[in-house]
Image (tube, rainbow, N blue to C red):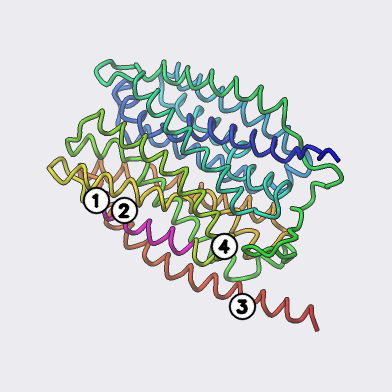
């Protein structure tokens, strides 16, 4: 008997392609641009960084309504709107001559990411792949690392640090790549498996990680640990995006060679792919506490290492160490968000909770970008900010342990009561 082709593999493929291009080309390259834009427009880095804040604020606000929008319009229409916004953003960046145009471009980019990256992928994987949610999520989001490795090399070669305004050609190349990808994704994408509604993720038949019915949304927002995990996610977004967003500029400030900087960033993108897959795999095998704790510990270590990087003989070894530990912490912003939502609060309110969690993360990112660059404008260095946030991340590690313990304790009570 001939086996029927499983269209799930096509959905996984187009999801990987979407993440590879949207995050790899439009996001992973972001640290290469601010200094070039600032020099071209004759302004300060902190003012250019407000464009990044516009991006994150937009993503945060839009994701608050993700659950409502995805049920009303379906994922395919939102993905189309997301691609259109990303292409428009890249083109506007390439032609912008004023700061307000940079801010509009950042806003469009935030809108595009809201409907083509972590939140959307988390929703789609929940619908199509309930049995190995963590591993599949890790594989799909790992595509960002591969895309980033390719994009950073291409963009780095297009940008000539000795030619003011050369970054504009790089943005135009990014716009073309995203537009071509949009056509491919939209041709093959389907909203859901046959016979499955858009209301909630399908349930798993296998007991991996944590898969359960969960709470109504009105009950979820009354629980203290819901707001506790929101704090953890907000601070993680602020610290990780803030610190990783200034890596290229920090390395150049301390005297590292530009080619070494782009090479390090490209190497980091490849490691990111492995880190996301590993995080999803660890979740499926050992649960939420193990994967979340490891990522947070790596965040503390990497931030401290970045603060110690200098342009001396230890510069390259420390930069390599930061690249390794830093990428191992990055899944806190991507893979872990859908897993927090489903594991801690269940499938019943999954879409709404996921939207809020991504909003919390991007709100933190919005604060992190200008905060780190303001520190540079005041102290002439990013080191004071890096040392401060390393301590904050250590506190978040402790809070996260209490949050997970409280959530899992209540889940056990509910499951025990349902079996009586």
Badge 3: residue crowd in 10 Å (few <14, some 14–19, many ≥20): few
409 lies left or right of 373 = right
Start-end of magenta stretch: 292-306
Q: Quadrant of the N terminus?
A: top right
Mark 4 or 3, which is nearer the eye? 4
Residue positioned most to the left:
312
How far apart marks 2 and 1 lie (CA) works out to 6 Å
Say above or below: 301 vs 244: below
Residue 269 is at least partly visible in this image: yes
How far apart marks 1 and 4 lie (CA) works out to 34 Å
Q: Which tag, 1 or 4, sits closer to the chain's start?
A: 4
Q: Residue 175, image x and y in percent?
A: 52, 20
Residue 389 occupies quadrant = bottom left
- State the mark number for residue 409: 3
How far apart marks 3 and 2 lie (CA) works out to 32 Å
> Observer-nearest residue: 363 or 194?
194
Magenta includes 302?
Answer: yes
Residue positioned most to the bottom:
420
Q: Which tag, 4 or 3, sits closer to the chain's start?
A: 4
Q: Quadrant of the C terminus?
A: bottom right
Are the residues at dot 2 and dot 1 in contact (C-beta closer than 8 Å)?
Answer: yes
Report which residue position mark 4 lands on.
285
Badge 4: residue crowd in 10 Å (few <14, some 14–19, many ≥20): some
Are the residues at dot 1 and dot 4 in contact (C-beta closer than 8 Å)?
Answer: no
Are the residues at dot 4 and dot 3 in contact (C-beta closer than 8 Å)?
Answer: no
Report which residue position mark 2 lands on.
303
Report which residue position mark 1 lands on.
307
Q: Residue 105, image x and y in percent?
A: 50, 27
- State the mark number for residue 382: none
Q: Which tag, 4 or 2, sits closer to the chain's start?
A: 4
How far apart marks 1 and 3 lie (CA) works out to 38 Å
């Amino acid at each position: 008997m001939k086996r029927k082709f499983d269209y799930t593999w096509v959905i996984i493929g187009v999801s990987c392609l979407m993440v590879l291009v949207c995050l790899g080309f439009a996001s992973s390259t972001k640290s290469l641009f601010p200094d070039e834009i600032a020099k071209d427009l004759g302004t300060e880095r902190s003012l250019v960084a407000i464009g990044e804040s516009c991006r994150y604020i937009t993503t945060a606000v839009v994701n608050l309504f993700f659950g409502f929008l995805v049920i009303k319009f379906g994922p395919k229409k939102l993905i189309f709107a997301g691609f259109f916004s990303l292409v428009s953003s890249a083109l506007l960046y390439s032609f912008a001559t004023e700061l307000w145009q940079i801010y509009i471009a950042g806003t469009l980019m935030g809108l595009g990411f809201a409907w083509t990256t972590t939140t959307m992928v988390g929703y789609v994987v929940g619908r199509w792949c309930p049995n190995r949610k963590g591993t599949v999520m890790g594989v799909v989001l790992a595509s960002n690392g591969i895309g980033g490795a390719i994009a950073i090399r291409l963009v780095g070669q297009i940008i000539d640090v000795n030619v003011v305004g050369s970054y504009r050609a790089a943005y135009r190349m990014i716009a073309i790549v995203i537009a071509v990808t949009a056509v491919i994704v939209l041709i093959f994408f389907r909203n859901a498996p046959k016979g499955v509604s858009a209301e909630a993720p399908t349930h798993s038949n296998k007991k991996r990680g944590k898969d359960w019915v969960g709470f109504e949304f009105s009950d979820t927002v009354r629980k203290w640990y819901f707001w506790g995990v929101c704090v953890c996610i907000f601070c993680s977004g602020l610290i990780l995006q803030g610190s990783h967003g200034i890596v290229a500029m920090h390395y150049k400030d301390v005297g590292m060679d530009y080619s070494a900087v782009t090479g390090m960033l490209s190497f980091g993108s490849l490691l990111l792919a492995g880190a996301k897959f590993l995080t999803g795999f660890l979740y499926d095998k050992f649960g939420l506490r193990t994967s979340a704790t490891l990522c947070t510990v790596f965040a503390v270590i990497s931030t401290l290492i970045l603060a110690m990087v200098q342009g001396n003989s230890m510069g390259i070894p420390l930069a390599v160490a930061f690249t390794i530990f830093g990428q191992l912490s990055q899944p806190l912003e991507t893979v872990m968000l859908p897993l927090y939502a489903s594991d801690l609060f269940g499938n019943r309110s999954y879409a709404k909770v996921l939207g809020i969690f991504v909003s919390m993360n991007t709100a933190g990112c919005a604060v992190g970008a200008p905060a780190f660059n303001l520190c540079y404008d005041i102290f002439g260095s990013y080191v004071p900010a890096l040392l401060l946030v390393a301590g904050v991340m250590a506190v978040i590690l402790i809070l996260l342990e209490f949050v997970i313990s409280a959530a899992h304790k209540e889940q056990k009570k509910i499951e025990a009561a349902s079996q009586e």
